Image (cartoon, rainbow, N blue to C red):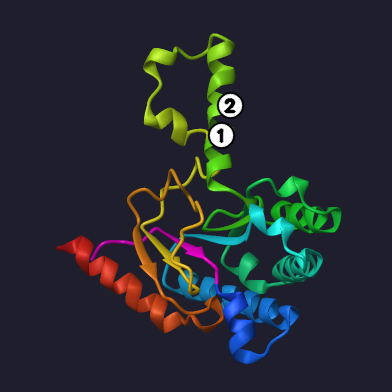
Amino acid sequence: MGKVNHVGFIVGGSKEYMQEKGATIEEAYSTKFDNVQRIVTSCVRGNVPIMTFLLLPQEIRSHNQYPLVVDSIVRFIDELRAWPLLSERQVKVSVLGHWYNLPGRLVDSIKAVMDQTKEYDSFFLNLCLNYDGKQELVDATKLIAQQVKAGKLDPDVITTENMKEHIYTSALVPPDIIIKTGASRKLQGFLLWDGANADIHITGRPWQSFTEQELDLIIKEYSRSEAQ
């Protein structure tokens, strides 16, 4: 069967979850992050080495409840630091996006978890925070332009490999599967470069109701199709 090495998750549907359950934003985000940990556990058990989650798109900064969202993410990341799975299974946590422009209390938590797990290399958990896929490509293009300006790269020999070397996930294989939850069918610019050939699955339901069993079925379906 075809091996799945990388699964991407567009974590959406909190608004629908709040409407369906009558939940507060704090309850929705607490449930959301609990499910992230369940799905990470399932991936590790299934030997899927790379997991990338879109948790905080760049545009959400204009949300009127943004401070509550930030507080929820701080709690989540602080809980990750105390999560035994990270050390037991050597899970390296990385944060992708312009996370350094986030509020200081969140930046401090991000730095702490990345420093704590920087030597781990069995599994790779990527959290996209203050992330925009188009900006990722702009950032990569700027780095390539700097090399050209410095005379280190001939523009006539620039290849797709050069772009890959400068995107946020430069050291990782592209996702085999991208799973989108929530009612919206938009991919929100997630992994624009690396996700070009990924299998897309749209659940149509909130992330909070996405289960390990659903993930297992999606992975098995992909593996069977790749093996044919």
- Compared with 228, 138 (above or below) is above
Please tell me whether mark 1 sits on a helix, a strand or a loop. Answer: helix
Task: In this rendered view, identify the residue nearer to me: 38 or 100.
Answer: 100
Quadrant, the C terminus: bottom left
Q: Which residues are magenta?
A: 1-12
Give the quarter of the image for residue 158: top left
Please tell me whether mark 2 sits on a helix, a strand or a loop. Answer: helix
- Compared with 161, 208 (above or below) is below
Q: Indicate left or right for 15 with 99 as reference.
A: left
Expressed as whole percent of the image width and height from the top left, the position of residue 141 reads: 53, 28
Is 8 colored magenta in this rendering? yes
Q: Amino acid under label 1?
A: Val
Give the quarter of the image for residue 35: bottom right
Residue at the left extreme, as displayed: 228
Q: Amino acid under label 2?
A: Lys
Expressed as whole percent of the image width and height from the top left, the position of residue 79 reads: 74, 72
Q: CA distance from mark 1 to mark 2?
A: 6 Å
Residue at the top extreme, as displayed: 151
- Compared with 117, 100 (above or below) is above
Instruction: Name the residue located 77 percent from the left edge and 65 percent from the top edge.
Output: 64
Q: Indicate left or right for 3 with 102 as reference.
A: left
**Residue count near mark 1 (Cα–Cα under 10 Å), binned few <14, some 14–19, many ≥20:** few
Label 1–label 2 contact, CB within 8 A: yes
The residue that mark 1 highlights is 138
Expressed as whole percent of the image width and height from the top left, the position of residue 128 reads: 60, 55
Expressed as whole percent of the image width and height from the top left, the position of residue 36 reads: 58, 73
Instruction: Name the residue located 67 percent from the left edge and 80 percent from the top edge.
Output: 28
Instruction: Name the residue located 62 percent from the left edge and 91 percent from the top edge.
Output: 21
**Residue count near mark 2 (Cα–Cα under 10 Å), binned few <14, some 14–19, many ≥20:** few
- Compared with 95, 27 (above or below) is below
The residue that mark 2 highlights is 142
